[in-house]
Image (cartoon, helix red, strand yellow):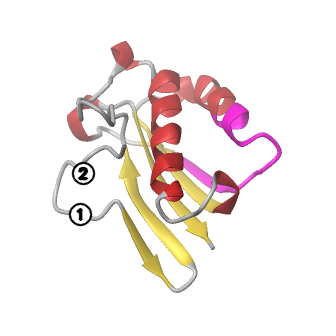
Amino acid sequence: MLPKPLGHYSQIVRAGDLFFLSGQIAIDPITNEICLFGGDAAKQTNLILKNIETILAGENLKKENIVKMTLCLTDLSQFSKVNEVYADFFGTHKPARTTVEVAGLPKGAAIEIETVAQS
C-alpha cells in the first residue's frame, strides 16, 4: 500500500528509462498519517525508505535500481543516525547522494528523501 501524496503531484514519473520519485516524508501507508517519531530522523528515514521501496515495486523496480538520492534534513546533527539506517537499507549498493540541511519540511518532518531510479 502506498502513502497518498500530500499535494498536487505524482509519487513517481517515468522519463525514458529514468524514474523520478517526489520527495517523501514519513507517512504511514495504511493510515496516511505523518509519523514524526518525536523528531527522530532515523526512524523517519526507515519508514521513508520502506515507502520508496514500495513505490518502486509498483514499477517492477528494486532498491538496486536507485541511482541518486537527495536527503533534506532539518538538523544535520542527526546525519550519523540517518546514515546508519541508510547503509543498513542499501547494503553494498551505493547510489549517488546529496545531503543538505534545510530550515523546514512539510508537516514538521525531520527528513525528506527524493529519489531517481533507472530501469
Q: Which mark is residue 113?
A: none
Q: Residue at x 58, y 66 (%)?
A: 117
Three-letter amino acid code of the residue under disc 1: Tyr
| Residue type, mark 2 in image | Pro
Residue designated by label 2:
5
Q: Identify the magenta region.
A: 86-99
Look at the image and say whether residue 71 sits in the magenta stretch: no
**Residue farthest along the left direction in this orientation:** 8
Instruction: Compute the Cα span from label 1 to label 2.
Output: 7 Å
Q: How far from the left and from the top, in percent, is residue 5?
A: 24, 51
User: In the image, is residue 37 above or below residue 55?
Assistant: above
Secondary structure found at label 2: loop
Q: Is mark 1 on a helix, strand or loop?
A: loop
Q: In which quarter of the image is the N terminus?
A: top left
Query: Are dots 1 and 2 in contact, CB under 8 Å?
Result: yes
Q: In this view, does 50 lie to the left or right of 1?
A: right
